[in-house]
Image (spheres, grey):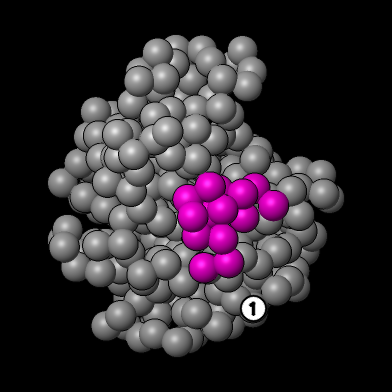
Amino acid sequence: MPDANTSSRPVPEIPLAGRKIRLLIDTDAGCEIDDQYAIALAVLSPERFDIEGFVSVQWGSPDTLDRTVREIETVLEKAGMAGKYPVRRGSDPIQYIDFPEESEGVDFIIERAMAGDAENPLFVVGLGAATNIACAYMKEPQIADRVIVVWHGRSRWPVSCFNANAWMDIKAVRNIYKSDLPLVLFDTGTYIRWPIEVSEEKIRPHGPLGEYLHGIRASAPHFRSPTKGFFDLGDVAFLVDPSLAEWEITAAPSVRPADNSYDFSRTHGSMMRVYHVSRDGTFELLHRALARAFPASDQG
């Protein structure tokens, strides 16, 4: 598809805390453990989010889309919300730069986006590869007027788009940067971490969900490490309470296909770049949400 006219690309506006947000989470839960924590915070924040559903994102091999669907459903079941929200299977990686891959997840993003408008946009939070978001946009460019995309794309700013989410589908990344989608680049979160002893004290006591989150933390040496990051949790924390974050408005660069480097000689309007989110504030949001939903004193 031809490049969009991005001269009037809108800069995203994040509503102040207290105002409801329509939310769809596009996630590769199961690839790591941070998405499960992000999903938990989202579903336990009904004062902030009207959650419209979840879409699974591929993370390499062909079976990952179905594995992610199962992981999303497991987190919802542990939260006592089995069957409460639609969970849809996303697309395989984009093969040809100008042609979207089909899936029920892509159609679901389009459906939910078109159900709103510019005054009540759908926030699509991408916690993995940008495959489904890019395919939805290519298939129906009109969603650009009805969505705000928050994509977790930690980078070597302003040098290169250097992260696993980009490597999983660089064609998708190139498409969302050059589109007219209102875009928030979530470009931080490596330092969102806490010792497993804190997880034992603050996460595990809070119901089946806390037990599950702590259990996956304890399931492997890498996950138990005190340096284990919970990167994607920051995206949701930022939306729950924007005062926890710092950001800038910057030009949206092109992404060179050869090496994923940014090209600021060819820009596509403006975007928001979140470059900091409070580690302590993020953790406290999750802890308080778990404690509200599953008071420790209620545990057997």
> Viewed as shown, does residue 62 lie left or right of 182?
right
Q: Could you say which is closer to the camera, residue 267 or residue 270?
A: 270
Q: Position of residue 34 (x, y in %)?
A: 50, 36
Vertical order, 85 against 42 (above or below): below
> Which residue: 74% across, 48% down?
67
Q: Could you say which is closer to the camera, residue 99 or residue 53?
A: 53
Q: Is residue 21 visible?
A: yes
Q: Is residue 3 visible?
A: no
> Which residue: 39% across, 35% down?
299
Residue 80 within the magenta-colored segment of the rendering: yes
> Which residue: 41% across, 20% down?
200
Q: Main secondary structure of the magenta part?
A: helix
View extreme (front): residue: 300
Q: Position of residue 24 (x, y in %)?
A: 47, 65
Vertical order, 247 against 13 (above or below): above
Q: Quadrant of the C terminus?
A: top left
View extreme (right): residue: 62
Residue 165 within the magenta-colored segment of the rendering: no
Res 171 → quadrant: bottom right
Instruction: State the SS at label 1.
Output: helix
What segment carries the magenta color?
70-84
> Which residue: 63% across, 22% down?
219
Vertical order, 38 against 106 (above or below): above
> Viewed as shown, does residue 72 lie left or right of 197?
right
Res 46 → quadrant: bottom left
Q: Could you say which is closer to the camera, residue 30 or residue 26?
A: 30
* Residue position marked by numbered label 1 in the rendering: 107
